[in-house]
Image (cartoon, grey):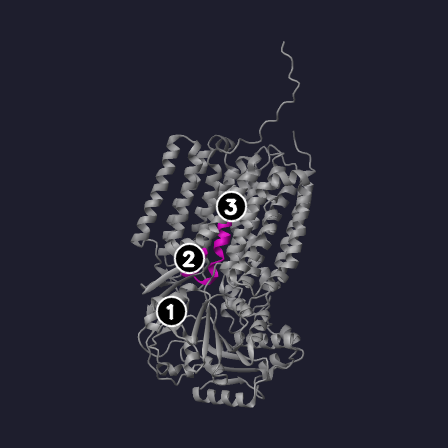
């Protein structure tokens, strides 16, 4: 009779080890997923209206969550015996369906009636593009839940691949355009399928290889044959442009215009001049004219009649800084008015390329003139560190009216229209200098001009102690021309009072060009304007207004969002705000309904008859829901904060996503050893403490590094985000490890709940920031992590079945 083995029996493995190629396959699928998500933001901005860009984030999360639900409902024998086949097939279908959906998106007129928001279009587009992300979710969820003991390494591969997508998108879109990058993302997904099939049988490897080869051919033929080019933008057929180029935050095109009156927004209605211009268009929504110029300033003397030239009439013969060069219009205005030096700062390198290179012969090569200096930089940062003083700083209608990679127009975090920004501008004026800002003027309710005036008064009061700003501001406006809805208003602000002579010049300028004077020294006929500029109880007056025209700050930098909670729908001049908020509300409702139908209901029905052991399920559901909410609230709030610091939504999105995903991947990799030494509860406590310190210190660090060059600001942002991201990568694998102590735990269910709450948080975070500020949104994310810590401690103390 054999003697019993004195050594204790090894516990059975919780799950089989990851097959060869799983890590590479998971990284490639994650890379393709984020690459597709970021590129869709760009494509939506061009194809649809700016409202829809934010859909990309949520539909990616929604599709992946549905994929997790499908994995949860798959029979266990399929997940165990055919894992590599399902992984390879899901990845291949992800790539093929993404290519097909891309072609449909680019060749379909989604807004045939010219509408800016249509629930049917939104829903159909949402469901169409959710299909490829569903296949992505199947692959990612199955890979992560299939080898629980290695979940920290698998999650690290997932996050690292996604981080690489941030970098690749910024480079690839310049070469391939939006449609080409989406097909390339599908190709990478198919390559991931080949990696998943590496350990499978030869038919599986052959099918995966054939799918990959098909996508390679499709990308090559589609790029050369122009299959994946835009056919419609904003409901209109696309006419072939003379020039077209993409980068990570814009698509620009240049079209020929028939010679006629100057295209623009502030010209005198008395001007009979006929000129040659081309239209430079950004995202098929924002246009700026390229004007023929042969070097003779006499040929562009008509620019002296433009409303935005008033600042140059008051302060001529000096040094000018132009924020947003565009097609060179403001540079030509400055030169035509006799300024000695013009410094033009333009963030978009493609715009400068079109102006100075591709169409340089047409525009007169402004960059080669000795009295012009062109700078490719973010204006606020450039001004902060330049150390120069200017007689005029001009900012004319600086917004794209199109979505960036961060969201929508009325949701855009614009760092040029905040108290802190205007302080920087005014500090870099000479003693006689003026800041000249032009916005749209709606005669029904001039909300944008009124908010400019509140910004002027707020900046002067906060930083220079000026309580009555009437003599520090000059403002003029032009009512809409026949057939138009919007006119233009220009506001001039100075640190020192304007003089009676300045008023006489402004009055003569208005008489000559049929403009209207709104404010000047000793002149302020409108009661609402006088209230904003001089009322000592102006904050109480703001509270009683139907719209929000309080001065925006860096914490709540939404200049274009003027709706209050409960603002009546019939307030004039808020059409765009109302429209965008309707989209946000509809989108929240759509997200909730689709999540209930495709996530919650299937999970509930799938649980019927399953032999799950539900010990500790409720705390774990709370944990995965809380970290889904917390991660998105923290991530989006920091995107919004860093957009201001770094100067453009692209930088905010790319830096936050790259650093958080990369650091979270490293944190996931280290989670097993760290939590083994400290315990999950202490790890969560450290994470909450770091998030609290981050929320308190980042505004101070941002103010400290504001004047640094862009590479230095990027490095500072990365150094700030990496420690936080490292710790944020630990909760998910720790939760999965805790859950796996129950051999019959619904692991994919937890993944699905985490995704569902992320979908909702991606929308709610924007609403929170709009109404209560970025700091509040970040604080809510911190509270979610605090709740997650509590739930994890409760789950770890729950006795699990043997």
Q: Earlier in the sequence, mark 3 or mark 2?
A: 2
Which secondary structure is most common in the magenta stretch? helix
Residues in magenta, as a range: 40-62
Can residue 237 be seen by looking at this rendering? no
Query: How far apart, in angstroms, are the residues tagged by discs 3 and 2?
Result: 24 Å
**Residue depicted at 43% across the width and 74% down the height:** 372
| Quadrant (top left, top right, bottom left, bottom right) of the N terminus | top right
Q: Residue furthest left?
A: 225
Where disc 3 sits, the SS reads: helix
Q: What residue is shown with label 1?
A: 355
Measuring from the top left, give residue 311's x and y in whole percent.
49, 81
| Quadrant (top left, top right, bottom left, bottom right) of the C terminus | top right
Indicate whether 27 appears above or below 204.
below
Q: Earlier in the sequence, mark 2 or mark 1?
A: 2
Residue 706 — which label? none
Residue 160 — which label? 3
Front one among 639 and 296: 296
Measuring from the top left, give residue 724's x and y in whole percent.
61, 51
Q: Determine crowd level at label 1: few under 14, some 14-19, many 20+ residues with C-alpha closer than 10 A.
A: many
- Depth check, mark 3 against mark 2: the one in front is 3
Q: Is residue 795 left or right of residue 146?
A: right
Q: Is residue 42 magenta?
A: yes
- Depth check, mark 2 against mark 1: the one in front is 1
Query: How far apart, in angstroms, are the residues tagged by discs 2 and 1?
Result: 24 Å
Can residue 358 be seen by looking at this rendering? yes
Q: Earlier in the sequence, mark 3 or mark 1?
A: 3
Q: Determine crowd level at label 3: few under 14, some 14-19, many 20+ residues with C-alpha closer than 10 A.
A: many
Residue 43 — which label? 2
Query: How far apart, in angstroms, are the residues tagged by discs 3 and 1?
Result: 38 Å
């Amino acid at each position: 009779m054999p003697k019993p083995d004195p050594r204790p029996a090894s516990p059975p493995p919780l799950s089989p080890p990851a097959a060869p190629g799983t890590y590479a396959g998971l990284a490639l699928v994650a890379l393709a997923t984020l690459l597709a998500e970021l590129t869709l933001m760009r494509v939506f901005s061009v194809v649809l209206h700016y409202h829809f860009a934010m859909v990309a984030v949520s539909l990616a999360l929604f599709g992946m969550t549905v994929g997790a639900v499908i994995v949860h409902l798959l029979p266990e024998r399929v997940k165990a015996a055919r894992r590599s086949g399902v992984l390879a097939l899901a990845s291949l279908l992800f790539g093929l369906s993404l290519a097909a959906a891309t072609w449909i998106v680019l060749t379909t007129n989604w807004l045939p009636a010219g509408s800016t928001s249509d629930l049917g279009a939104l829903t159909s587009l949402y469901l169409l593009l959710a299909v490829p992300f569903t296949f992505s979710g199947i692959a990612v969820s199955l890979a992560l839940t299939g080898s629980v003991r290695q979940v920290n390494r698998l999650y690290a591969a997932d996050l690292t691949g996604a981080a690489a997508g941030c970098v690749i998108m910024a480079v690839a879109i310049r070469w391939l355009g939006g449609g080409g990058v989406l097909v390339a993302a599908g190709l990478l997904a198919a390559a991931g399928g080949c990696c998943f099939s590496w350990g499978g049988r030869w038919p599986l490897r052959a099918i995966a290889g054939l799918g990959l080869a098909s996508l390679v051919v499709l990308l090559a033929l589609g790029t050369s044959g122009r299959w994946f080019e835009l056919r419609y933008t904003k409901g209109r057929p696309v006419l072939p442009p003379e020039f077209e180029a993409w980068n990570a935050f814009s698509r620009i095109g240049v079209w020929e215009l028939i010679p006629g009156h100057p295209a623009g927004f502030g010209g005198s209605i008395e001007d009979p001049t006929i000129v040659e211009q081309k239209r430079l268009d950004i995202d098929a929504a924002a246009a700026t004219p390229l004007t023929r110029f042969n070097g003779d300033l006499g040929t562009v003397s008509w620019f002296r009649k433009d409303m935005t030239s008033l600042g140059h009439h008051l302060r001529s013969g000096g040094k000018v800084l132009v924020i947003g060069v565009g097609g060179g219009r403001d540079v030509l205005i400055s030169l035509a008015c006799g300024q000695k030096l013009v410094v033009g700062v333009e963030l978009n390198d493609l715009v400068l390329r079109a102006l100075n290179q591709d169409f340089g012969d047409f525009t007169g090569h402004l960059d080669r003139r000795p009295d012009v200096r062109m700078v490719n930089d973010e204006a606020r940062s450039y001004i902060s560190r330049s150390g120069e003083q200017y007689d005029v700083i001009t900012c004319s209608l600086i917004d794209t009216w199109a979505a960036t990679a961060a969201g929508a127009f009325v949701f855009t975090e614009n760092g040029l229209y905040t108290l802190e920004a205007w302080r920087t501008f005014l500090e870099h004026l000479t003693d006689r200098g003026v800041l000249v800002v032009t916005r749209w003027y709606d005669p029904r309710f001039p909300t944008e001009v009124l908010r400019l005036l509140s910004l002027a008064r707020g900046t002067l009061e906060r930083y220079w102690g000026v309580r009555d700003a009437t003599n520090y501001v000059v403002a003029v406006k032009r009512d809409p021309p026949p057939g138009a809805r919007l006119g233009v208003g220009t506001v001039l602000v100075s640190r020192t009072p304007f003089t009676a002579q300045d008023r006489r010049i402004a009055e003569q300028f208005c008489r000559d060009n049929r403009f209207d004077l709104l404010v000047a020294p000793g002149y302020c006929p409108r009661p609402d304007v006088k209230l904003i500029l001089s009322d000592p109880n102006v904050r109480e007056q703001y509270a009683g207004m139907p719209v929000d025209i309080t001065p925006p700050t860096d914490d709540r930098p939404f200049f274009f969002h003027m709706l209050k909670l409960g603002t009546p729908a019939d307030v004039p001049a808020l059409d765009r705000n109302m429209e965008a908020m309707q989209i946000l509300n509809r989108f929240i409702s759509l997200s909730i309904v689709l999540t209930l139908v495709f996530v919650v209901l299937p999970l509930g029905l799938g649980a019927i008859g399953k032999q799950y052991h539900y010990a500790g399920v409720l705390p774990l559901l709370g944990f995965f829901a809380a970290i889904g909410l917390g991660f998105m609230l923290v991530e989006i709030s920091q995107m919004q904060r860093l957009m201001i610091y770094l100067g453009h939504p692209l930088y905010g999105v790319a830096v936050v996503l790259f650093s958080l995903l990369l650091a979270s991947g490293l944190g996931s990799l280290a989670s097993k050893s760290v939590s083994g030494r400290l315990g999950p509860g202490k790890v969560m406590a450290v994470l909450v403490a770091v998030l609290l310190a981050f929320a308190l210190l980042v505004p101070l660090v941002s103010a400290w590094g504001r004047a640094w060059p862009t590479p230095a600001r990027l490095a500072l942002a990365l150094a700030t985000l990496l420690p936080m991201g490292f710790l944020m990568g630990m909760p998910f694998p720790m939760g999965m490890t805790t859950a796996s102590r129950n051999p019959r735990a619904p692991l994919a269910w937890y993944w699905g709940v985490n995704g569902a709450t992320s979908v909702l948080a991606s929308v709610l975070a924007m609403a929170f920031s709009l109404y209560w500020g970025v700091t509040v949104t970040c604080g809510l994310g911190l509270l979610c992590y605090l709740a997650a810590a509590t739930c994890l401690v409760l789950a770890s103390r729950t006795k699990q079945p043997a």
